[in-house]
Amino acid sequence: MSEIETSQQLSSEQREALLTILQTRFEQHMHRHPGLTWANVQARLEAHPQKLWSLQAMESTGGEPDVVGYDQATGAYIFYDCAAESPSGRRNVCYDRAGQLSRKENRPEHNAVDMAAALGVELLTEAQYRELQTLGEFDTKTSSWLQTPAAIRALGGAIFGDRRYDHVFIYHNGAQSYYAARGFRGVLQV
């Protein structure tokens, strides 16, 4: 994560490389965003260059961000992490700082909530995660922490999702738990 923490500015070369990656992914997965055009997405990205840093952070941590929707009320394009498995650079983390600090031993270096904030994104909600799963098969070998309702978190729990047996499951764990195969997926509106 140190690579993404150092600067929130992209060089012109990084910007062009990222736009090429995003355009290629956009064109390869048109089923994720029917009716949308890359030219409009690119224009929006160029009008909001500060969001490129977050997209680069999503990309560099293995998220493979792609457009999954458009908010007509705000004009924003919605990006989700669309990597087949939970992003590799964001795994092995507790749910949040309280969960992380409650571990007496074997405390992981990071937690999902703080990492998401550092990336400039939010964790997917359960509804967003289920929506993502309609666009393909995600987390068939991994799992992803999800935004947890306050009532569950107040009792010490946190929720995560995965796809097994051709079904999307939402489970719970203690917020202090972490696993090599569990990370988190982010959402960014541009």
Image (tube, rainbow, N blue to C red):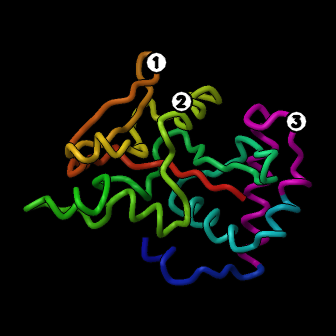
Location of the N terminus (image quadrant)? bottom left
Q: CA distance from mark 2 to mark 1?
A: 10 Å
Q: Main secondary structure of the magenta part?
A: helix
Precedes in sequence: disc 3 or disc 2? 3
The image shows residue 29 at horizontal and vertical percentages of 75, 38
Q: CA distance from mark 3 to mark 2?
A: 21 Å
Residue identifier under label 1: 167
The image shows residue 21 at horizontal and vertical percentages of 73, 57
Name which residue lies at 54% across and 30% down. Answer: 130
Residue 186 - label? none
Residue 130 - label? 2
Range of residues picked out in magenta: 13-41
The image shows residue 27 at horizontal and vertical percentages of 82, 43
Q: Which residue is at the front of the view, 101 or 152?
A: 152
In the image, is 121 to the left or to the right of 190? Answer: left
Q: Amino acid at mark 2?
A: Arg
Q: Amino acid at mark 3?
A: Gly
Circles 1 and 3 in contact, beta carbons < 8 Å: no
The image shows residue 151 at horizontal and vertical percentages of 30, 41
Precedes in sequence: disc 1 or disc 3? 3
Q: SS for tag 3? A: loop
Residue identifier under label 3: 35
- Whether 141 is drawn above or below 109: the answer is above
- Whether 181 is drawn above or below 166: the answer is below
- Whether 103 is drawn above or below 144: the answer is below
Badge 1, how many Cα within 10 Å: few under 14, some, many 20+?
few
Precedes in sequence: disc 2 or disc 1? 2
- Whether 145 is drawn above or below 163: the answer is below
> Could you say which quadrant of the image residue 134 lies in?
top right
Q: SS for tag 2? A: helix
Q: Amino acid at mark 1?
A: His
> Could you say which quadrant of the image residue 12 lies in?
bottom right
